[in-house]
Amino acid sequence: MASITQKIIDIEPVEGCIASAMRVLGRKWSALILRDLHRGPKRFCELEHSIEHITPRVLSQRLIDLESQNIIKLEAGSYELTSKGYDLIPTLVQMASWGNKYPS
Amino acid sequence: MASITQKIIDIEPVEGCIASAMRVLGRKWSALILRDLHRGPKRFCELEHSIEHITPRVLSQRLIDLESQNIIKLEAGSYELTSKGYDLIPTLVQMASWGNKYPS
DNA sequence: CAGCATCCAGAACGATACTG
DNA sequence: CAGTATCGTTCTGGATGCTG
C-alpha cells in the first residue's frame, strides 16, 4: 500500500521533471553516449568508433546538446560525465533492467 | 567501487534494452499517459481532460502505440496499465527524481 | 463520447564531402 | 584527429474538422 502511494506522490507533482530527463535522454544516441562515458572519459573519435553507425554530424550535435545541459564536459580533449550526468546512470540502469525483462 | 562496477555490468550488454524502453517512453506525452493510468484506469476523454494541451489525434496515436506494445490495455471502455506497463513506473520515478534534483 | 481523416510545418536524422 | 557544411528524407506532432 505504502509503496504505491509513495510512487504516486513521487510522480504526481513533477511531470516537468520527467520532461527534463526526457530532454536529455529522449534523442537518439544520447543514452549510448552516456553509457560509454560512464566507463570513463573518451575522445571524439573513440566515441565515434565505439558507437556503431553514428555519424560525426550527429555525434557532434549530441555532444553539444549534452554539454550545453551540463551532462558532460570537455576536459583536456576528452568528454566526461559531470555529476549531473552521472546521476542519470541509475535511470539508465532501471531502463535497461526493464528492457531486459521485456525484450522486444 | 563495487557499485560502480555493478552499474557497468548492468548496462554494458544491454544497449538494446535501453532502446526498448526508449521506444515506449521516447515519444511526447507517453510518460504523462503512463503516470495518469498509474493512478487507475481512465477513459479516453478523462485522459484528454487530465492531460492539458494534448489533441485527440495525438492521444489516440499514443494509445495505439502503447497498446500495441502491451504497455496498456483497453478494458471495458477504460485504459489501464498492464504489468509490463506498471513495471515502467520505477523508471519514471527515477527520472522524476533526477529532474527534481536538477530543475531546468 | 471515442475516436479517425487531412493537411502541414518543423524537427530530427542520415549520407556525403570537406576543412583547420 | 575533430569536427563543420550541405542536402535530402523521414518522422512527429499540431490544427481543424468529421463520423458512428
Image (spheres, coloured by chain):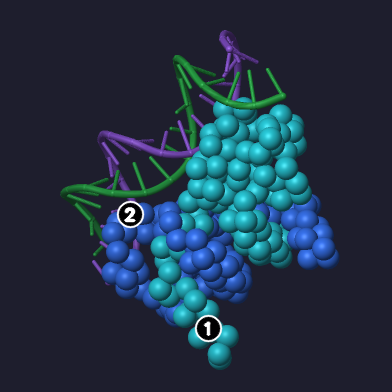
Chain colours: A cyan, B blue, C purple, D green
Please give left or right for residue A50 compared with residue C8 in the image.
right
Q: Secondary structure at mark 2?
A: helix
Mark 1: amino acid: Gln
Mark 2 to mark 1: distance in Å? 32 Å
Is residue A7 among what the camera can see? yes
Mark 2: amino acid: Arg
Q: Chain of mark 2?
A: B
> In the figure, A101 relative to B78: above or below?
above
Relative depth, front residue between A61 and D12: A61
Relative depth, front residue between B8 and B63: B8
Find residue B57 and name its label.
2
Q: Which mark is nearer the camera, 2 or 1?
A: 1
Q: Position of residue B4 (x, y in %)?
A: 78, 61
Q: Chain of mark 1?
A: A
Q: Farthest residue to the front: give it.
A: A76
Q: Position of residue C13 (x, y in %)?
A: 54, 35
Q: What residue is at 37 percent from the left and 59 percent from the top?
A: B59
> In the figure, A9 relative to A89: above or below?
below
Is residue A27 among what the camera can see? no
Find residue B28 and name its label.
none
Q: Secondary structure at mark 1?
A: helix
Q: What residue is at 42 percent from the left and 66 percent from the top?
A: A15
Q: Identify the residue under disc 1.
A: A6
